[in-house]
Image (tube, helix red, strand yellow):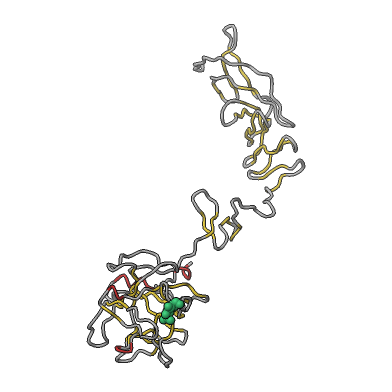
Amino acid sequence: MRAKTIISTFLFQASLIGAQGVPVRKLPGEFDIDGNTIIFEGTDGFDSMMRCSGNTVIQLTPDKKFVACCLDGQHLTGDEKTGFDCCADDHDRVGSAATGYHCCPKGQIFDGQVCKAEEKKEEETCANGKILVNGKCACPPGTKEIEDGTCEKEECSSGLETGKCYEFTAENGERLVFAGAWGYAVGPETKARRSGKFRFCKDKECAAGQPINPSDMFYMQDVHGHPRTGTRPNQWLNNAANGRHIGKTNDFSKAGKFSVSKWPCGKYCLSGFSAGLGIACPAADPSMSFYENDTQACMRFEITEIPCDIRKDENNCIWNNSPDQCCGGKVDCSAAKL
Ligand SMILES: *[C@@H]1O[C@H](CO)[C@@H](O)[C@H](O)[C@H]1NC(C)=O
């Protein structure tokens, strides 16, 4: 005698037949399966049962709500909306109300006549103003993704920051060197002339980490002292104007007030905050001077970030071991690593 614990409130339904599908029976809440037979509580004290005839076997939907008689090796797929089918292994009942339904290999679609791979849209469209880059939606160049997933125009930055140190290279390849009484000059480094190591500051204490935009005023502190003796380190470039050579001073009230703007082709143009900046006198190694009424005058340099302290281990990160530095003298090689 088979054990049965059947309490059910089952509704025996007429067969549900999907378009060209297979007939199914809805199962009661509780039932027993014995081999090829399903047993459940009937009425008037009788049990009811369903058995698949011929060479078919009972197959249940994964949710065990419907049963059908399928050939061996088939399984029951589908639902009340699409109808049901006995499909072979690795096949599912797919299709649509418009096309009808059919057993197709998993992952394929039924177009009304044949099973086929799902068509990829000709050109995958990206939302939020994104474009397709290597098969992925990404923000177009010059923009970046913001929190809500849209692309926003990327704010350009100067790339210059307070607290950091920089050296200046003029268009002729010469550095801005400290030349003693001659002040700062564009010329070769020699025993007596050392390339300046300019720390950019917005205040006397040189609070670090503030961007230096073209509309900002900043001061420059030369970390280097005099060549060889090292005297007078960390002094301010002064405010010498109208042909007098900009040199250095210990007196912050006499510090030169500078501004700097990006210039085409990776360059910067150095000027005064309100005054302009130009060559002090004609020379092979010209010095600089502020010109108060020639306000748009500026001197073009390549500005390269260099370590403020040459003995910091973090300087190892200035460039990595990749043979491709592609820096062109610039410290930030991050773009090259992408
Ligand atoms: C700049 O212009 C002002 C006003 O015209 C004038 O008084 C001053 O002398 C000028 N400065 C120089 C250095 O030329």
Is residue 294 toward the left or the right of residue 229 in the image? Answer: right
Q: Residue at x 55, y 51 (%)?
A: 150
Which residue is pictured at 44% across the width and 86% down the height?
173
Identified at 63% across, 29% down, the residue is: 57
Residue 57 visible (yes or no):
yes
* The image quadrant in which ligand 1 is located: bottom left
Q: Quadrant of residue 281?
A: bottom left
Tally of numbered discs: 0
Q: Is residue 129 above or below residue 165?
A: above
Nearer-the-camera pick, 46 or 296 = 296
Q: Is residue 127 above or below residue 320?
A: above
* In-front residue for pair 149/113: 149
Residue shown at 75%/36% (left/top)?
98
Q: Give x and y (percent) for residue 94.
A: 68, 38
From this viewpoint, which residue is outermost toward the bottom?
284
Location of residue 181 by image quarter? bottom left
Give x and y (percent) for residue 319.
39, 73
| Residue 172: x %, y % from top left | 46, 87
Query: How far from the left and from the top, in percent, is residue 296?
Result: 48, 76
| Residue 258, quarter of picture | bottom left
Whether residue 329 appears in this view of the structure is no
Residue at the extreme top of the image, as rendered: 44
Drawn side of residue 234 relative to residue 44, left or right: left
Task: Give whichever of 282, 29 is nearer the camera.
Answer: 282
> Which residue is nearer to you in this view: 90 or 95?
95
